[in-house]
Image (tube, rainbow, N blue to C red):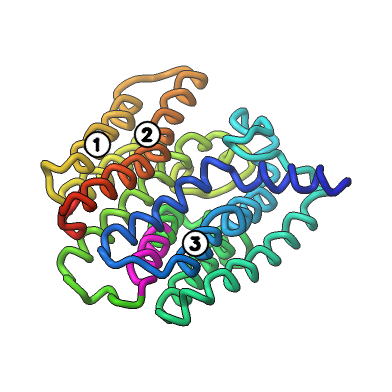
């Protein structure tokens, strides 16, 4: 395979839209801390949360989900849903993921020199990225734990942003930090559960035991709705982010009370994903503006 073809393959595997969501979660942590990192370490850490980390997050998953991906109508070799990897590409993607893991840690090092906690949270993110997809643990096939592990990975990205300046740790303003962090955890868990619901039938066809194949459609949608509602309750119920969480919860409820065709189901679940993928970076930009105008970042949603 030519070099440019390999680069193009890794770009598709990394899900550019996923890169936007992961790095935006890191920036969200910075905003909540109200204490900003030095320019170069902050930029390097943002780079770590983009292409390199997403190769690990999504590339390892694509390798070990090969059988279900071959049957999945959502996986059409696109920049949104990733690539249908051929078995001949598996070793290359796994090797690239190992190199990317080292690169992520190297990019994290400058920020970790000022705040050692950053390295711990980044290591946790990488640990989940590998153990979620790869055997022997393969958390993806441990129902409910699969969704919660995704929530923990999202929380770890947020925590990296919160502590990266070195001026604060997670004990500062503990009540607000706990609520904000738990919000990220529950939103991340809901996002995963909705994805598992979308892939339920193809996962079941190849014998994968996920939250959706184990609990079924109804309980998975109820789980998703509860996670969104709990997240909304944890933060200010009248904040825009809480109102959006409640609004997004209408999507799994709509699927719960209707029997959509597979194509309509895919369209609805993509609206759910798009609302989160675009919502967090838009919130980052909006909140950064209002913090510049004097708002309290810890209580800003």
Q: Residue at x 75, y 62 (%)?
A: 95
Q: Residue at x 38, y 68 (%)?
A: 37
- Write down the residue under mark 1: 244
The residue that appears at 45% across and 47% down in the rendered structure is 21
Label 1 CA crowd tier, 10 Å (few <14, some 14–19, many 20+): some
Residue holding disc 3: 43
Q: Answer few, some or many: residues within 10 Å of disc 2's Cα (few below 14, many 20 plus, some between 14 and 19).
A: some
Q: Nearer the viewer, residue 44 or 12?
A: 44
**Rendered image: mark on residue 275:** 2
* Residue at the right extreme, as displayed: 1
Q: Main secondary structure of the magenta part?
A: helix
Mark nearest the camera among 3 and 2 is 3
Q: Look at the picture and state if 237 lies above or below 95.
A: above
What SS does tag 3 mark?
A: helix
State if disc 1 and disc 2 touch (CB < 8 Å).
yes
Where does the image place residue 63, in percent across and percent down from the top left? 69, 51
Residue 9 on image: x %, y %: 74, 44
Q: Which one is nearer the viewer's eye here, 101 or 46?
A: 46
Q: Which residues are magenta?
A: 154-165
The image quarter in which residue 253 lies? top left
Which secondary structure, mark 1?
helix
């Amino acid at each position: 395979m030519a070099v440019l073809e390999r680069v193009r393959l890794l770009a598709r595997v990394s899900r550019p839209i996923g890169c936007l969501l992961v790095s935006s979660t890191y920036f969200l942590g910075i905003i909540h801390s109200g204490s900003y990192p030095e320019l170069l370490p902050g930029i390097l850490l943002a780079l770590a949360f983009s292409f390199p980390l997403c190769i690990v997050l999504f590339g390892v998953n694509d390798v070990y989900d090969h059988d279900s991906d071959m049957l999945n109508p959502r996986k059409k070799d696109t920049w949104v849903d990733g690539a249908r990897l051929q078995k001949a590409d598996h070793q290359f993607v796994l090797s690239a993921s190992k190199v990317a893991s080292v690169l992520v840690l190297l990019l994290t090092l400058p920020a970790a020199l000022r705040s050692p906690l950053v390295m711990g949270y980044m290591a946790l993110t990488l640990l989940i990225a590998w153990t979620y997809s790869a055997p022997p643990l393969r958390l993806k096939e441990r129902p409910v734990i699969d969704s919660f592990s995704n929530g923990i990975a999202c929380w770890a990205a947020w925590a990296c942003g919160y502590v990266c300046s070195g001026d604060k740790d997670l004990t500062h303003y503990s009540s607000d930090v706990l609520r904000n962090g738990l919000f990220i955890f529950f939103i991340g868990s809901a996002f995963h559960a909705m994805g598992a619901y979308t892939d339920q039938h193809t996962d079941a066809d190849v014998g994968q035991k996920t939250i959706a194949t184990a609990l079924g459609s109804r309980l998975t949608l109820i789980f998703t709705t509860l996670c969104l509602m709990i997240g909304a309750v944890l933060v200010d119920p009248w904040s825009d982010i809480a109102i959006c969480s409640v609004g997004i919860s209408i999507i799994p409820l709509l699927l719960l009370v209707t029997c959509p065709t597979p194509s309509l189901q895919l369209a609805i679940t993509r609206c759910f994903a798009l609302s989160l993928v675009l919502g967090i970076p838009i919130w980052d930009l909006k909140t950064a503006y209002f913090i510049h105008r004097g708002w309290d970042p810890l209580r800003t949603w």
